[in-house]
Image (cartoon, rainbow, N blue to C red):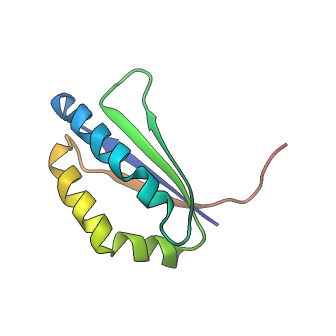
Amino acid sequence: MLIRIVKLSFKKENIKKFEVIFDTNKHLIRQVTGCNFLELYQDSEDSSLFFTYSYWDSQADLDNYRNSDFFKKQWSQTKPLFSEKPVAWSLIKKETLK
């Protein structure tokens, strides 16, 4: 399993626009082959800072999503809203503590 975390920084005036884009597409992203989980987080101190957190079956599934027309359309709507370049991490879960 691959865990993907993406840090997104928005211009304050664009936060609502981003939230609408995410809310409109979240159920479709969750239906993409290989996507098992998707959540959106907002920083508790900086309201313009968001993180997406998703689980993917494989890097290939994530790459297929990122190369899809669906992603490209979302990205073209979201990219102009940023205040900084997004930062992404792909992680492999090593252990679950219970």
- In the displayed structure, does residue 74 sit left or right of residue 96? left
- Is residue 98 positioned above or below 74 on the image? above
Q: Residue furthest right?
A: 98
| In front of the other: 87 or 59 | 59
| In front of the other: 28 or 78 | 28
Residue at 40% x, 20% y is 45
- In the displayed structure, does residue 93 sit left or right of residue 71? right
Residue at 38% x, 38% y is 50
- Is residue 6 positioned above or below 33 on the image? above
- Is residue 76 positioned above or below 98 on the image? below
- In the displayed structure, does residue 24 sit left or right of residue 85? right
- Is residue 64 positioned above or below 83 on the image? below
| Residue 71 drawn at (x, y percent) | 31, 65
| Residue 95 drawn at (x, y percent) | 77, 55
Quadrant containing the N terminus in the rendered view: bottom right
Residue at 52% x, 72% y is 33
- In the displayed structure, does residue 19 sit left or right of residue 52? left
| In front of the other: 71 or 96 | 71
| Residue 77 drawn at (x, y percent) | 19, 53
Quadrant containing the C terminus in the rendered view: top right
| Residue 12 drawn at (x, y percent) | 20, 28
